[in-house]
Every structure is written in structure tokens, then in C-alpha cells.
Image (spheres, rainbow, N blue to C red):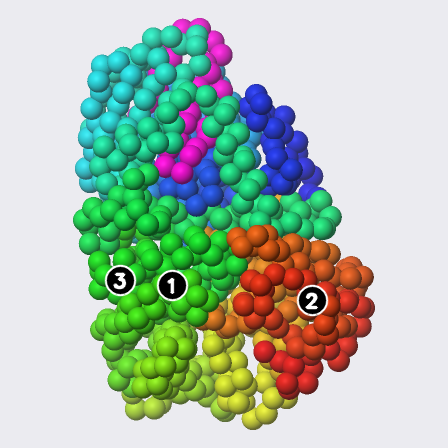
């Protein structure tokens, strides 16, 4: 373990609140991993999938402050109740509190050595004023404890102006009852164009409002010698909703009990997968689960009320409503992971998708705070919903199919060109990224075809299956790359497969080397685009060795490079597993181990790219146990090279599914043979249904490549 990371873990345990010792698994989580470099992860207190993510907010000083916090900074604006984790755009930062020494103070300097954090708990010791800050949370509420260490006056500043990144406030209001309750609202626009957050805050002692202005108020403590507790409830529906959430989730004032409950919630979440591995791997693995389960976020009040995509307040008590859907990223691994360990929650998300489709006329692309941001390309909501349908997690399949078809026929974002031409011509779409859009729409179209086919709708299945082959039109057999093509069937020139210009060329945060493989829905079809399977294999080998200049204007997201394979960005995440589809799982093994051991570490910058709301970590959570779903809509789980010796998934049905890697080591990375429930398994994949039935997958590992799963009938 890196020395810095070990120091953080020792400090974390030393500064836990009274009676709140870390659990058997939460002790392995280091939330600071990814707060440096380009990880962009949230640091603070929350519970799994909670709406409230309460933690420190700093000035936005650039791209690496998208979560509101970066390890290189030490100036606090305060402690805000909403944050994003791992995104490439900054937003939120709602309802900020800061203990101050005077009515004029509006920032505080701190030291990272004075911080402690674990799942559900954050603390920092400030020196101007001298105060110990502790934070914890429930799903919809935050709880603060401020202990002022010196006598004299003490103040709390309420800031409704502060936001993160693109966030810009346009309306604020608060009312003070004159004793201990403050309620109000903060409306802002940014990445999400219309964000409405209401709050209700209760102080544990009387306070006095001594200064106020537009969007802020400063409150004087009347008992500065006593710890001040503050309970803050949030809602997107109204102040009454915020008060109702406080009553439902924080009726008392026991901070330590609330922190213990948060720890227990995370302990229960982490326990869904238990592993046998070294302590270092456990730190990385359970931190990855923690990051993966920060979002999507619950987006309804305790009584089921929620603000819909139509801007209206609705109520549905059948299950939770959700937001923070970074679907371009998460349809690849995060959503499949949830379908295994959280099928009931995934079903709630499926219902959320259908509500969004009903309210805004199409399925979500990147939904935030009830707003469609339309961020990134394609129709990833179609893909994610199709996967849920094909796994039996959506009750009203006809409703889902209609929503998918409507979404794929709604003009805009280049989709009308895709449907007309069978691809998006370079000369007709002024917004660029035509190759990326075409390939993503093809994945979505194939997903619709699979759902329609499962329901016996042959006409719809045939139409969308054809559209799902759109990648074939963009494959240039001469260069063996996916390339931009005009409406007159002319390849865009000049062409440099290495060069990339961020969001201004034919690709999205990538180049031709990375996007040529973006056909996870039809790997065998992509193989046939090449002169032979051998030619495909040679090209795939080259991806991991070839070197070239990306250019000065390349996206910073193109990171974690092995040759031109970019693990730091999501379109590459399935590529290594393509070796299984050509009968060469032994070629995947050393690459998978390299990624897991070198690009996921215990360091502050222990992620090779931004977390992307759980996707980066979900890849590791699945890959480390030896499984990955390549085909995103209902596809099988491909067997890789497990990093851990044994993993047991505790399924919601009460069953367990265990992956046991016998003789596993840093040298024994190749599968020699496999058994599923005691019977020989010669193919390099299992189905979702087999996994969810429970059982044991036994993999015998060795130091040399084997012939296991190399025959055509043994491939995915």
C-alpha cells in the first residue's frame, strides 16, 4: 500500500466519532482514492444511493474540481448538501453551511491532515475559528456537529449562492423563525437547466440572525460552549417535503447513532459481495463498490412525491424515483452490476425511466435533478432499459418497448439522419461526432430489436436489427478503421487514426483506434468486417502496442493508455473481453491483470480517469471477480481473469453465487478449466439467468495459456 494511503486510513480510524467504529468491510473503504488526479470523486458523508451527499465544497478552479473538491486545494467555501461524483462537468453544491469566526468571514483554510472520512462520516478540524466539524447523512437529510474549542462568539454562515462548476443560482429565499429553524429554497441553472432545491434546517440551540443579504445569512450561537447540531432536510418538491423528510429520517438529535446507521447501511451494501484477497486489494475493491453505489441518487420524498421531468410534482409510492443517470458511461458496467446485486433497485430505476419517458416524451440520456441534459451521444437510456427488460426486471414490457421505439424515432441529436441514411453523414450534421453517434445509435437500435424479438414483434425486431448493423457502413476495409462518411459516400480526409480533437471531430473523446471496436452488441459481425478472423486478431493486438500522437487538442478523458487502448474513458471498457469472442481468452488475461493492478491503486490519484458516476469502479468490481457483460442489452457475462481468489455474491433471492479461482496468483492468470456447479464448463461465459440462480463457478488457474474455451462453439 502506498504510504500516503496508509496514513489516511490510520487517521480515519483515529478520528471516528464516539461509538462509531468502522465495520468489518467499511474499514477497507478509503473515500480519498480518486480525490486527486482526474478522479473527480465526491468526498463527504452519504448513504448508498442517497440524494444528500454532504461534504466540503471548494472554489471551482478548473476541470478537476467537478465534484467540488480536489486534494490539491485547501480553501473551503463550506459544507454543501449535494455533490456529483466522478463527472466531467461540475454542478450542484446546494445549501452550504460554514462555521466562521466573524460575520464577514466567508471561507476557511484547512489542512488535509486534519480531515477524516469513512463511509457515512466526514470530519475536519478548522483553526479559524477553532472548531471540530463532523458530518453524517441519511438518504434525504444531512446532520452536522460543530464543536467550538475556544470561548467567545461563534457563528454559522448559511450560503445559498455557492454552487459548483456550471451551477448559477437565479433565486434564493429563506425564513427564520427567530429561534432555531430556517427554511427556504435555492433555484439554479447549469448543467441541469432548472434545478429546484428546498430545505429545512433545525439548530439544536437557539441562534440569532445577525447579518443577512441576498442568498446568505449569518447566525450567532447563543451557547457556543455546547456542541451545535444542525439537521438539514432536502426536497425537490417544496419546503413541506423537506420538513417531512426530516421528520421521517432524523426525528432525534443523536449524531453518533446517525453516523453508526450510515456505516451500517454501507456495511450492508458492501457485504453484497465478499472477496478473498490481500488487504491492499480489499481496500481497492470495497472502495470501488463504495464509489459505484454513490449513484444513481434517490429523487423523491419519503412519502413518494417527486419532481418530474415535466417540472410538475407527482407522487408514486410504489418505489423510489431516481436521478443522476450518467447513462453514456454506466450502461456498460454500472447498470449490469446493479441488475445482479440490486435487482429490486434496478427495477425501480426502470420504472423511473418510464416515468421520464412519459413526462418528457423520450427516455433519459443524462438525467440530473429532473432535467434532461442531453449530455453525450446516442440513446443510452434505451440500452439500459432494454437490459432490464431482457432480464425480467420490467413488468410492463409493452410500455417499455413503446418508450424505446418513440425515443429512437424522435428527431434531434442526429437521429433523423441516422434513420434516413442508416448512419450520420459528416456533411449533414454540423455538431460533429458522427462516427460516435452512429455507433451508439446502432447499439441502441440492436437493443430495441432484442426486446421486440423477445416479445414476438418480428417487424420491429427486423427493422431495428438492420439499424443495429449501421457500424458496417462506417467501416473502411482499406484502413480497417471506423471513419466519417459523407452523404455522397466519401470518406472524410485527411485521416489520422491517432489524432483527436475534443468534441470537434468524428469521435467523442477518442480517436479511430478506440472507436473501431465500439460494436459490443455484435462482436462477431464486427469480426466479419475484417478480411479474416486472423486480421481482426492482429488489429486488436495492435491496439495495445501501437504508439501515436493524439494531438494538442485531444480530450483529457483519453487516459489510462495501453498503446491506444484508453481505460480512462468508457468506450474502451469492453474491448479486452473481445478476445473471448475469437477464442483467445488467454490474450485477455494479461491485459486485464495489467489494468486492474496498475490503473486501480490505493493512492489519492488511484483512478486512471474520472469515476463517471460509478462506471470506472463498476468495471473493476466485475472484472476483479472474473466476469463482465460485453453485450450491454441482455448479453452474457464473459469470463476473464479474476484478480481475487474467491468472491461470493449474496443475491436478493437469498441464494449466493460464488466464483472460486483455484491456484490463483500473479503468475497463474490463465484459466485452464472451469466448472459450473460441479459440471465442466467449456465456454467462456455464463448467462445472467445462470448467475441469478446461484451456484459456484470454479476456475482452475495456471501460469500458461490453455486451450480452454478456444473452439468456435465455446465462445460468447
Q: Which residues are magenta?
A: 131-158
- CB-based contact (under 8 Å), mark 1 and mark 3: no
What is the CA distance from the residue labelled 2 to the residue labelled 3? 41 Å
Give the quadrant of residue 642.
bottom right
Q: Is residue 50 above or below residue 403?
A: above
Looking at marks 2 and 3 on the same chain, the residue that comes earlier in the sequence is marked by 3
Q: Secondary structure at mark 2?
A: loop
Please say whether residue 111 is visible from this viewpoint.
Answer: no
What is the CA distance from the residue labelled 1 to the residue labelled 2? 29 Å
Looking at marks 1 and 2 on the same chain, the residue that comes earlier in the sequence is marked by 1
Q: Where is residue 118 shown, x and y percent of the image?
A: 55, 35
| Mark 2 vs mark 3: in front | 2
Looking at marks 1 and 3 on the same chain, the residue that comes earlier in the sequence is marked by 3
Q: Which residue is mark 1?
A: 394
Q: Is residue 368 magenta?
A: no
Furthest-bottom residue in this view: 531
Give the quadrant of residue 533.
bottom right
> Residue 413 vs residue 347: left or right?
left
Q: Where is residue 271 shown, x and y percent of the image?
A: 59, 46
Q: Is residue 497 above or below residue 562?
A: below
- CB-based contact (under 8 Å), mark 1 and mark 2: no
Q: Is residue 137 magenta?
A: yes
In what quadrant of the picture does the C terminus appear? bottom right
Judge the density around disc 3: few (<14), some (14-19), many (≥20) Cα neighbours within 10 Å: many
Q: Which residue is mark 2?
A: 677
Q: Which residue is mark 3?
A: 357
> Residue 261 vs residue 315: left or right?
right
| Mark 1 vs mark 3: in front | 1
Q: Residue at x 49, y 48 (%)?
A: 293
Judge the density around disc 2: few (<14), some (14-19), many (≥20) Cα neighbours within 10 Å: some
Amino acid at each position: 500500500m502506498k504510504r500516503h494511503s496508509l496514513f489516511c486510513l490510520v487517521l480515519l480510524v483515529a478520528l471516528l466519532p464516539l461509538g462509531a467504529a468502522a465495520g468489518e468491510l467499511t474499514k477497507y473503504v478509503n473515500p480519498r482514492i480518486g480525490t486527486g488526479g482526474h478522479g473527480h470523486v465526491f468526498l463527504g458523508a452519504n448513504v448508498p444511493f442517497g440524494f444528500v451527499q454532504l461534504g466540503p465544497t471548494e472554489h471551482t478552479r478548473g476541470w478537476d474540481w467537478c465534484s467540488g473538491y480536489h486534494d490539491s486545494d485547501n480553501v473551503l467555501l463550506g459544507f454543501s448538501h449535494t455533490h456529483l461524483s466522478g463527472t466531467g462537468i461540475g454542478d450542484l453544491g446546494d445549501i452550504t453551511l460554514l462555521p466562521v469566526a466573524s460575520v464577514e468571514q466567508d471561507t476557511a483554510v484547512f489542512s488535509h491532515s486534519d480531515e477524516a472520512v469513512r463511509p457515512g462520516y466526514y470530519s475536519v478540524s478548522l483553526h479559524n475559528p477553532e472548531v471540530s466539524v463532523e458530518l453524517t447523512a441519511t438518504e434525504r437529510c444531512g446532520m452536522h456537529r460543530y464543536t467550538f474549542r475556544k470561548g467567545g462568539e461563534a457563528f454559522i454562515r448559511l450560503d445559498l449562492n455557492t454552487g459548483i462548476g456550471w451551477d448559477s443560482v437565479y433565486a434564493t429565499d429563506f425564513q427564520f423563525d427567530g429561534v432555531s429553524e430556517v427554511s427556504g429554497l435555492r433555484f439554479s441553472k447549469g448543467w441541469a437547466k432548472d434545478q429546484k432545491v428546498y430545505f429545512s434546517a433545525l439548530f439544536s440551540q437557539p441562534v440569532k440572525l445577525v447579518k443577512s443579504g441576498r442568498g446568505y445569512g449569518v447566525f450567532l450561537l447563543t451557547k457556543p460552549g455546547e456542541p451545535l447540531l444542525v439537521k438539514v432536510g432536502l426536497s425537490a418538491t417544496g419546503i413541506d417535503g423537506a420538513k417531512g423528510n426530516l421528520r421521517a429520517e432524523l426525528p432525534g438529535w443523536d449524531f453518533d447513532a446517525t453516523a453508526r446507521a450510515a456505516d451500517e447501511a454501507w456495511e450492508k451494501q458492501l457485504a453484497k459481495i465478499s472477496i478473498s484477497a490481500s488487504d491492499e486489494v480489499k481496500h481497492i475493491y470495497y472502495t470501488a463498490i463504495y464509489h459505484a453505489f454513490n449513484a444513481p441518487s434517490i429523487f423523491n420524498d419519503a412519502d413518494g412525491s417527486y419532481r418530474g421531468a415535466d417540472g410538475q410534482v407527482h407522487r408514486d409510492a410504489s418505489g423510489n424515483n431516481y436521478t443522476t443517470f450518467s447513462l453514456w458511461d454506466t450502461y456498460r458496467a454500472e447498470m449490469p452490476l446493479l441488475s445482479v446485486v440490486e435487482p429490486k433497485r434496478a427495477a425501480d430505476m426502470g420504472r423511473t425511466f418510464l416515468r421520464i419517458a412519459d413526462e418528457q416524451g423520450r427516455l433519459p440520456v443524462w438525467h440530473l435533478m429532473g432535467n434532461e441534459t442531453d449530455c453525450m451521444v446516442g440513446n443510452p437510456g434505451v440500452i439500459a432499459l432494454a437490459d432490464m427488460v431482457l432480464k425480467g426486471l420490467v413488468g410492463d414490457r409493452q410500455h417499455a418497448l413503446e418508450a424505446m421505439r418513440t425515443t429512437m424515432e424522435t428527431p434531434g441529436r442526429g437521429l433523423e439522419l441516422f434513420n434516413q441514411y442508416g448512419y450520420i453523414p459528416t456533411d449533414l450534421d454540423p455538431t460533429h461526432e458522427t462516427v460516435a453517434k452512429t455507433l451508439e445509435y446502432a447499439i441502441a437500435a440492436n437493443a430495441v430489436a432484442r426486446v421486440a424479438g423477445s416479445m414476438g414483434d418480428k417487424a420491429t425486431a427486423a427493422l431495428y436489427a438492420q439499424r443495429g448493423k449501421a457500424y458496417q457502413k462506417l467501416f473502411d476495409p482499406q484502413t480497417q478503421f471506423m471513419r466519417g462518411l459523407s452523404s455522397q459516400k466519401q470518406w472524410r480526409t485527411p485521416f489520422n487514426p491517432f489524432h483527436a480533437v475534443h468534441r470537434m471531430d468524428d469521435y467523442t473523446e477518442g480517436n479511430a483506434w478506440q472507436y473501431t471496436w465500439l460494436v459490443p452488441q455484435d462482436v462477431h459481425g464486427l469480426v466479419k468486417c475484417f478480411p479474416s478472423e486472423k486480421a481482426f486478431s492482429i488489429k486488436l493486438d495492435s491496439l495495445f502496442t501501437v504508439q501515436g500522437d493524439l494531438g494538442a487538442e485531444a480530450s483529457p478523458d483519453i487516459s489510462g493508455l495501453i498503446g491506444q487502448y484508453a481505460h480512462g474513458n468508457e468506450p474502451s471498457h469492453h474491448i479486452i473481453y473481445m478476445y473471448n469472442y475469437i477464442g483467445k481468452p488467454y490474450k485477455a488475461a494479461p491485459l486485464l491483470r495489467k489494468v486492474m493492478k496498475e490503473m486501480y491503486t490505493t493512492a489519492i490519484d488511484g483512478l486512471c480517469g474520472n469515476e463517471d458516476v460509478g462506471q470506472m469502479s463498476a468495471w473493476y468490481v466485475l472484472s476483479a471477480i472474473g466476469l463482465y457483460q460485453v453485450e450491454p442489452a441482455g448479453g452474457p457475462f464473459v469470463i476473464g481473469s479474476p484478480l481475487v481468489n474467491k468472491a461470493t455474491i449474496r443475491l436478493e433471492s437469498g441464494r449466493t453465487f460464488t466464483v472460486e479461482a483455484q491456484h490463483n496468483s500473479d503468475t497463474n492468470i490463465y484459466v485452464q478449466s472451469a466448472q459450473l456447479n460441479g459440471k465442466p464448463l467449456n465456454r467462456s461465459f455464463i448467462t445472467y439467468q445462470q448467475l441469478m440462480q446461484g451456484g459456484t463457478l470454479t476456475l482452475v488457474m495456471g501460469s500458461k495459456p490453455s486451450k480452454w474455451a478456444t473452439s468456435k462453439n465455446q465462445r460468447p
